[in-house]
Image: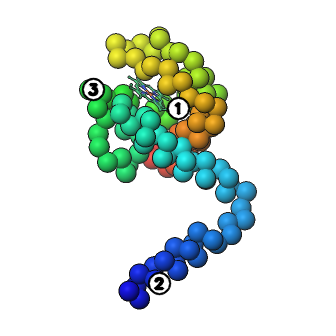
């Protein structure tokens, strides 16, 4: 009992702690993009290390980390890919246009780009 209320207090304290930083909005967007990708993109891609089940698509689409490590991936190229039909991606299993709204593209692109910067040290 005591532990539970202590935990609750801790969680509240963390959640309420003012993160008065400029990146706060950006990291919210990244977290939202991570959740969104797990829901919408994970049937075909490995989108995150904490993905519970493997993609249904066999063979799966390239993982998000593999995609952003290409090196030629930019915010503009991701936005273009996610907002247009991409029939010429060059493989028999093509990615359908996910038909996302702008706010959905914002968060999933922020998430993808965060994977890119997060992996810089592995280069
Ligand atoms: C129905 C399966 C499917 C879903 C759902 C899907 N993708 Fe894909 N995606 C693919 C396939 C297949 C490819 C590889 C296409 C190729 O190699 O030509 C791909 C490729 C990509 C690429 C990289 C293309 C490149 O040129 O390197 C990105 C970025 C991408 N997907 C993002 C997403 C995002 C973000 C979502 C969720 C909003 C998503 N995908 C959902 C099947 C899917």
Residue 18 vs residue 60, the one in the foreground: 18
Give the quadrant of ligand 1. top left
The residue most toward the left is 58
| Nearer mark to the viewer, of 3 and 1 | 3
**Which quadrant of the figure contains the N terminus?**
bottom left
| Mark 1 residue's CB less than 8 Å from ligand 1 | no
Mark 3 and mark 1: Cα distance apart in space: 23 Å
Q: Which mark is residue 71?
A: 1
Q: Give the image location of residue 82, x and y in percent.
A: 55, 25
Q: Which mark is residue 59?
A: 3
Mark 2 and mark 1: Cα distance apart in space: 45 Å
Using a 10 Å C-alpha cutoff, classify the residue at mark 1 as few (fewer than 14 neighbours), some (14 to 19) or many (20 or more).
few
Mark 3 and mark 2: Cα distance apart in space: 46 Å
Residue 2 can be seen in this image: yes
Residue 119 can be seen in this image: no
| Nearer mark to the viewer, of 3 and 2 | 2
Q: Give the image location of residue 77, x and y in percent.
A: 60, 25
Numbered disc total: 3
Q: Residue at x 36, y 30 (%)?
A: 44
| Nearer mark to the viewer, of 2 and 1 | 2
Q: Residue at x 55, y 48 (%)?
A: 32
Mark 2 / mark 1, whichever is N-terminal: 2
Q: Which mark is residue 6?
A: 2
16 up-or-down from 115: above or below: below
């Amino acid at each position: 009992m005591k532990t539970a209320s202590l935990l609750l207090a801790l969680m509240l304290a963390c959640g309420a702690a003012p993160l008065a930083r400029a990146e706060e909005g950006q990291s919210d967007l990244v977290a939202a993009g991570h959740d969104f990708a797990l829901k919408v993109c994970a049937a075909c891609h490995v989108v995150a290390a904490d993905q519970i089940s493997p993609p249904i698509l066999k063979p799966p689409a390239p993982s998000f980390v593999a995609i952003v490590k290409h090196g030629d991936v930019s915010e503009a190229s991701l936005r273009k890919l996610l907002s247009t039909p991409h029939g010429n991606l060059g493989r028999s299993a093509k990615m359908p246009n996910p038909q996302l709204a702008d706010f959905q593209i914002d968060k999933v692109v922020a998430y993808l780009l965060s994977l890119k910067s997060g992996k810089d040290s592995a280069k």
